[in-house]
Image (cartoon, grey):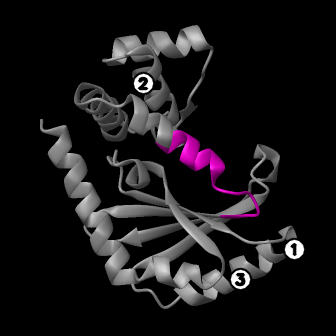
Amino acid sequence: MDYFKYSKNREQEADRILKETNLLNKLKQFGEVKQVGSYFLDLMVKPDLDFVLRVKKSSEIDKTIKLIKKAVKKIKHLSHKKTVDRTKLGLNGKSMHFYYRCKDIWGIDILVTTKNFKEYYKIKNKVINKITPRKKINILKLKYSFYKDKRLKNTSYSIYNSVLDENVSNLKEFYEYLKNKNISLKVNKAKT
C-alpha cells in the first residue's frame, strides 16, 4: 500500500470539506483559531479534523460554544454529536464533537479554550525536527493499522513518540513500547 498517497488523498478530502463548509472562516469570528492534529502535522489517516479556538476568558467559553452551534447549524451534512468539558484534563475548555457525512463520516473536533497554542507548536516542531521519509511511512502505517482495525482510539501521540523517539517501525515494537512506557490506550467500545 502507498501510505503517502493514502494520506495525501485524505488531506485533499479535508481541503474539500474545509472549502465546502467554510468552517475555518466561520470559527475565526469567535476567536483565534488553529488547525491542529494530523492535518496540521501532514500525517492524515483517519477522516477527522481538529481545531483549537482560543478565547480570552473562561467566562466566554459557553457563550462561544452556543454561537458556534448556531453558526454551523446551516452547514449541510454537519451534525453536532456532543460537547465535553476538558477542564479535568488541564485544557481549560470544552471540546465540541461534530460529524460531517459525505463519502466517509468525518469527525470534526473543536476545542474552545483559553490556553495558548504553545503545546501544538511544540508537537509540530518535534515532528519537523525528527521526521524522515522512513519514519513518516512507519507513522502512517501504524496509524492505518489502528484506523482499519478500529480496536483502539487516541493512539496518534503514542505512535508519534514511539516512532520519532524510539524508532519503532511495526506493531510488535509499538506494543512493546507501550508496555515499557506503561501506556494503556483506550479501547474503542464498538469493538470490545
Residues under numbered marks 1 and 2 in contact, where contact means CB atoms less than 8 Å apart: no
Mark 2 lies on a secondary structure that is helix
Q: Position of residue 31 (x, y in %)?
A: 66, 77
Residue 117 in magenta stretch: yes
Q: Which element type, helix, strand or loop, lies under badge 1?
A: helix
The answer to which of 82 and 91 lies nearer the viewer is 91
Looking at the rendered structure, the kind of residue marked 1 is Ser
Please tell me whether mark 3 or mark 1 is closer to you in this view.
1
Q: Which residue is disc 3 drawn over?
A: 66
* Vertical order, 30 against 139 (above or below): below
Query: Is residue 31 positioned above or below 159 on the image?
Result: below
Q: In the structure shown, which secondary structural element does the residue marked by tag 3 occupy?
A: helix
| Mark in front: 3 vs 2 | 2
On screen, 37 above or below 136? below
Which residue is labeled 1 in the image? 59
Q: Nearer the viewer, residue 127 or 79?
A: 127
Relative side of 65 to 35, left or right: right
Which residue shows up at 53% across the image and 16% down it? 178
Residue 164 numbered tag: 2
Which residue is located at x 60 percent, y 20 percent? 183
Q: Residue furthest front?
A: 129
Residue 152: x and y in percent read 47, 34
Tell me, yes or no, whether the highlighted magenta stretch contains residue 127: no
Identify the mark nearer the N-term, 1 or 2: 1
Tell me which segment is drawn in magenta.
112-124
Q: Amino acid at mark 3?
A: Lys
Which numbered disc covers residue 83?
Answer: none
C-alpha separation, residue under disc 1 versus residue under disc 2: 38 Å
Classify residue 9 by image quadrant: bottom left
Q: Is residue 90 visible?
A: yes
